[in-house]
Image (cartoon, grey):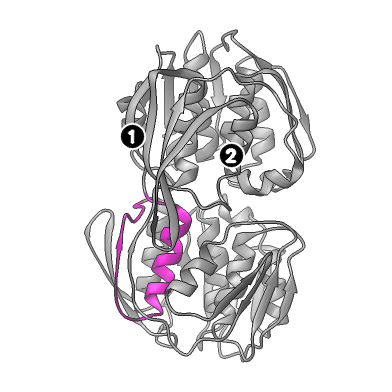
Amino acid sequence: MTRVYEARPTAGVGGEITVPGDKSISHRALMLAGIAAGRSEIGGFLASEDCLATLRAMRSLGVAIERPEPDRVFVDGVGLRGLGAPIAALDMGNAGTAIRLFTGLLCAQSFDSTLIGDASLMKRPMERVAQPLRSMGADVRTSDGTPPVRIGGGRRLHGIDYRLPVASAQVKSAILLAGLYAEGATTVTSPAVCRDHSERMLRGFGAGVEVDGLRVRLEPAARLEAQRLQVPGDFSSAAFFIVAGLIAADAGGLLIRDVGVNPSRTGLLTILREMGGKIEVTNWREQASEPVADLRVHRSALRGIEVPKDWVPLAIDELPVLFVAAACARGETVVTGAEELRVKESDRIAAMSAGLRAIGVAHTMLPDGLRIEGAGDAPLVGGVVDSHGDHRVAMSFAVASLRARAPIAIRDVANVATSFPGFVDRARSVGLDVRES
């Protein structure tokens, strides 16, 4: 049965909240801990469907993993060459990060493997990963460019000097994972800044990584060392509450604690501040080689802007909720250069456009983004929105209910569990009125 959110208008939000652990870091921590030598401990692990798919896959590859608490994991690493052949295809569920990173890791192994996923994932493009891995000597086959991904084992890989056609942390990470096993150094150069979680974590596990601007150089590794890690709160999950605070916080503001603020992830903060958003970043510290801080968000009179294209890659996953902020701003907001949204869990440009139309937001859908005419102080209308099974679309329209004059019904929300288990409870704890049925 299709799951539905009913998001009702409410007086506002306030208090404080924490968000679950970072999804991108949780994926990478499991993988690197699994091929390290010794026992790693991962605290703050995101117990979402996406990350649990990675956990199950690592177990299928022969890695012993204990999970005494939902967000605490012990991994007994088998070393770089200790993974074993799985007895069946590895199911990545809805996890785009997992399927791309595993392609890089598994193409360097001695055994054959196959990667599959749910109906949505089986439509995601994989050649952007497969092509550079083939140039390293890997045997990676897709089905007309999409999963299943069939990987032949026993190939000798060699390092490459690769320039990414578009900025993609997933492609970069897949190449670097393969490069751990290659003969000679592997270099990846990005055309723009993208997430650097893999470089940071590889260095933390003992790999030889050099970063020079947009260029990353990795030496093949003889050994990775087990680590004790505390995963920061996921900035992409915090993004929904940042926008909620900007459009509806009470006088004390909304405090979001323990959020990862890696500068390759926080483009949304730059955009929202340019729109007039009041966001304080305090209590800076470091966890798992990542910067962490607390965010206090105040209700703000947002104004529309034209978002510079070079800011877009640093906010790509947060753009759905940025579109909601733009709908509540005064004046026009234009986002272009976001064609990557067309190939996410849904076509997020089309899904957000349809949803915004359903709640009365004037806008124009562009090939690579949206042009949104903000309502300013005027309330949004309620309506029925189809999330198309996309977790970020669903949660974005739940936030939009804060400025609506009637409830918003959001269809097909089951996949929220892929990134943010417990979203409804946490949202209600700070004042949103969201119910699932």
Q: Which amino acid does label 1 sit on?
A: Ile
**Would you place residue 432 above or below residue 173 in this image?**
above
Does residue 161 belong to the magenta stretch?
A: no
Q: Measuring 60% from the left and 35% from the top, which residue is drawn there?
A: 320
Residue sitting at the far front:
283
Q: Name the residue under label 1.
A: 17
SS category of the residue bearing label 2: helix
Q: What stretch is highlighted in magenta?
A: 21-47
Q: Calculate the distance from the C-alpha at mark 2 to the C-alpha at mark 1.
A: 19 Å
144 sits left or right of 6 in the view: right
Above/below status of 169 relative to 334: below
Q: Is residue 27 left or right of residue 304?
A: left
Horizontal and vertical percent for residue 384? 54, 19
366 sits to left or right of 187: right
The residue closer to the viewer here, 263 or 134, is 263
Q: Which residue position is annotated with label 2?
A: 268
Using the image as rendered, state which of residue 412 and residue 397 is in the foreground.
397
Look at the image and tell me in which quarter the N terminus lies: top left
* Residue drawn at point x = 56 percent, y = 45 percent: 266
For residue 366, say whether it is visible.
yes
- In the image, residue 7 lies at what x, y percent? 43, 20
Residue 225 image point, x, y percent: 37, 81
**Residues packed near mark 2 inside 10 Å, few (<14), some (14 to 19) or many (20 plus):** many
Q: Which residue lies furthest to the left in this view?
A: 68
Label 1 crowding class (10 Å Cα cut-off): few <14, some 14-19, many 20+? some
